[in-house]
C-alpha cells in the first residue's frame, strides 16, 4: 500500500481531515508552525527586495532627468550671455580670463614688441591739462590695440569720453577705466603680468618706492590690486622695490635694469643673492643684468636711454662726447656690455639712436616709446633739430620695417618729468579684457565692437 506524499510548507486550509490535538503529535505541529512562519518571511523579503530595487532605479532616473533639465535651462542662459551675441544688452565677464594657447615667452615678464591685449594710458588730471596728447595717441594707434585711459572717478571717465568725441574720434578709440591712483606714471607702479601655468596668468606686484613715499602715494601702490580684480587675475606680492620704467624684458628670460634697483634693495637689507633669488622665483627669469643710469637724470630709469625691439635687438641712446662726455661714455659702455649678452636667438644686436638735447633741467629721450601691435609711437619735441628727429625715426623704421612709426609731441609731458613710456602700461595678449571692457566708459551698448 503506497503512502500519500505531502508537499513541504503545505497550506493547512488544503487539508481534508481534521485531527484532534494529541500529546503524541504536538512536536510535529510546532515544527509545522515554524516552517509556515519561515515560508511567509522569505516571500515577504523577496517581494520587499524587488520593490526596493525598482524604487531605487525609478528615483535615480528621476534625479538624472531633473538634473539634465535644470542644467539645460540655467547653463544655456550663461553661455548665451557670455557669447557676445548682438542681441545681448549685458557684457558678461567669465569667472576667470580666457587664455590663448601658451607660448614659452608667456612665462617671462612680457616684452612690449610682442602682441598686446590692451594698453593703459595714465590720465588723471593731465587729461584736462593736455587733452590733445590723448587724442594724438588714440588717433595714432587707430584701434590696432584697445586703449584705456586711467582716471580716478566716473566724472573724469565721462569727461574723457566727451573729449574723445569732441576730437572727432570713434568712441572706442580710447575708453576710460576708473582705477584710483595718485599719479599718471602708471608704468612705474603697475604690476607685471606673466603666465603662472598653462591655465592661469598672474600679476606680480612689487613694492613701490620707500615706505615714506608709499604713505604719500598709497593709491598708486594699491592700484594693482583693483586692476587684478577687474582682470580676474591672482596677485603675488614680492618684497622688492621696483619701478616699471627701470625694467626692460626681452621676453626670453633676460631682464635689464639700472644699478638703482640693486642699490635701493640692498639698502632694504637684502643680500644680492636674495635679490637674484626673488627675481628668479617670482618673475621666472633666468638672467638679470644691471647697466649704468644717466648721470644727473633724477629717475635713474633704463627707459630713458634704451629699449628692446626683439629678443636680441636693443636700441641704446647716443650722446655727442663734446656735449656730455660723462654720459656719452656711460652709454657707450652700456652698448658694449649689452652687445656682449647672448639670447636664445643669438647675441644681442645693439643699434644706436641720437639723444635729444635736454630742455633746461628736464631730460628727453627717443627710447621712451609705446609699442602697440605694429604701431610705434616715438616722442617728438618742437624745438629739436628736425634732422635729429628724422635720424631717430629712421632707426626704428630700419629696425622694424613692417611697423608704422608715428611721432607724438611730448613738450608738455617733459615739463612733468616723463614721456610716452612712462604713462603707458602694456597687457600681454593672453589676458582677457572682458572685465575691463565691462567696467569701462563708454558702456558697451554705446560702442560698436
Image (spheres, helix red, strand yellow):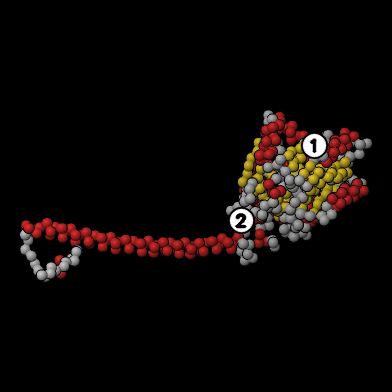
The answer to which of 49 and 441 lies nearer the viewer is 49
Residue 303 x/y as whole percent: 79, 42
Residue 164 x/y as whole percent: 75, 56
Q: Is residue 59 above or below residue 153?
A: below
Tell me which corner region of the image, top left, top right, bottom left or bottom right, holds residue 180. top right
Q: How many marks?
A: 2
Camera-nearest label, 2 or 1 = 1
Tell me how far mark 2 sits from mark 1, CA to CA.
Answer: 42 Å
Residue 291: numbered disc: 1
Residue 404 in sight in this render = no
Residue 27 x/y as whole percent: 12, 56
Q: Is residue 423 above or below residue 52?
A: above
Tell me which corner region of the image, top left, top right, bottom left or bottom right, holds residue 51. bottom left
Residue 429 in sight in this render = yes
Side of 409 relative to 120 (left or right): right
Residue 296 x/y as whole percent: 83, 34
Residue 198: numbered disc: none
Q: In the rendered image, which quarter contains the C terminus?
A: bottom right
Give neighbour class at mark 2: few <14, some 14-19, many 20+ (Cα, 10 Å).
many
Give the residue pinned by disc 2. 93
The answer to which of 27 and 191 lies nearer the viewer is 27
Amino acid at each position: 500500500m503506497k503512502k500519500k506524499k505531502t508537499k513541504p510548507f503545505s497550506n493547512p486550509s488544503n487539508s481534508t481531515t481534521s485531527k484532534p490535538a494529541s500529546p503524541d503529535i504536538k512536536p510535529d505541529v510546532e515544527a509545522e508552525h515554524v516552517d509556515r512562519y519561515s515560508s511567509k518571511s522569505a516571500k515577504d523579503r523577496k517581494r520587499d527586495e524587488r520593490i526596493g530595487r525598482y524604487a531605487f532605479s525609478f528615483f535615480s532616473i528621476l534625479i538624472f532627468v531633473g538634473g539634465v533639465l535644470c542644467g539645460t535651462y540655467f547653463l544655456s542662459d550663461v553661455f548665451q550671455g557670455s557669447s557676445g551675441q548682438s542681441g545681448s544688452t549685458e557684457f558678461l565677464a567669465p569667472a576667470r580670463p580666457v587664455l590663448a594657447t601658451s607660448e614659452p615667452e608667456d612665462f617671462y615678464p612680457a616684452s612690449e614688441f610682442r602682441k598686446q591685449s590692451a594698453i593703459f594710458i595714465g590720465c588723471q588730471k593731465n587729461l584736462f591739462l593736455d587733452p590733445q596728447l590723448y587724442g594724438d595717441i588714440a588717433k595714432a594707434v587707430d584701434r590696432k590695440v584697445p586703449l584705456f585711459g586711467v582716471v580716478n572717478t566716473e566724472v573724469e571717465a565721462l569727461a574723457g569720453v566727451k573729449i574723445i568725441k569732441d576730437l572727432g574720434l570713434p568712441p572706442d578709440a580710447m575708453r576710460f577705466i576708473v582705477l584710483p591712483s595718485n599719479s599718471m606714471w602708471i608704468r612705474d607702479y603697475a604690476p607685471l603680468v606673466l603666465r603662472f601655468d598653462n591655465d592661469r596668468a598672474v600679476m606680480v606686484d612689487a613694492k613701490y618706492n620707500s615706505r615714506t613715499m608709499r604713505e604719500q602715494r598709497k593709491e598708486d601702490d594699491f592700484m594693482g590690486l583693483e586692476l587684478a580684480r577687474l582682470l580676474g587675475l591672482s596677485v603675488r606680492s614680492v618684497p622688492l622695490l621696483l619701478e616699471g620704467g627701470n625694467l626692460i624684458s626681452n621676453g626670453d628670460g633676460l631682464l635689464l635694469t639700472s644699478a638703482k634697483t640693486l642699490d635701493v634693495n640692498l639698502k632694504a637689507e637684502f643680500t644680492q643673492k636674495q635679490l637674484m633669488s626673488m627675481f628668479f622665483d617670482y618673475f621666472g627669469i633666468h638672467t638679470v643684468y644691471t647697466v649704468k643710469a644717466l648721470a644727473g637724470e633724477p629717475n635713474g630709469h633704463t627707459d630713458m636711454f634704451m629699449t628692446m625691439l626683439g629678443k636680441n635687438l636693443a636700441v641704446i641712446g647716443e650722446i655727442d662726447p663734446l656735449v656730455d662726455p660723462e654720459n656719452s661714455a656711460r652709454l657707450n659702455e652700456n652698448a658694449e656690455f649689452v652687445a656682449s649678452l647672448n639670447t636664445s636667438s643669438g647675441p644681442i644686436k645693439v643699434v644706436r639712436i641720437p639723444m635729444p638735447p635736454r630742455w633746461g633741467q628736464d631730460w628727453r629721450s627717443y627710447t621712451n616709446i609705446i609699442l602697440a601691435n605694429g604701431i610705434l609711437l616715438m616722442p617728438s619735441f618742437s624745438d629739436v633739430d628736425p634732422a635729429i628727429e628724422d635720424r631717430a625715426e629712421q632707426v626704428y623704421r630700419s629696425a622694424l620695417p613692417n611697423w608704422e612709426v608715428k611721432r607724438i609731441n611730448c613738450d608738455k609731458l617733459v615739463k612733468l618729468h616723463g614721456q610716452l613710456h612712462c604713462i603707458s602700461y602694456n597687457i600681454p595678449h593672453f589676458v582677457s579684457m572682458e572685465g575691463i571692457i565691462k567696467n569701462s566708459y563708454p558702456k558697451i551698448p554705446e560702442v560698436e565692437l
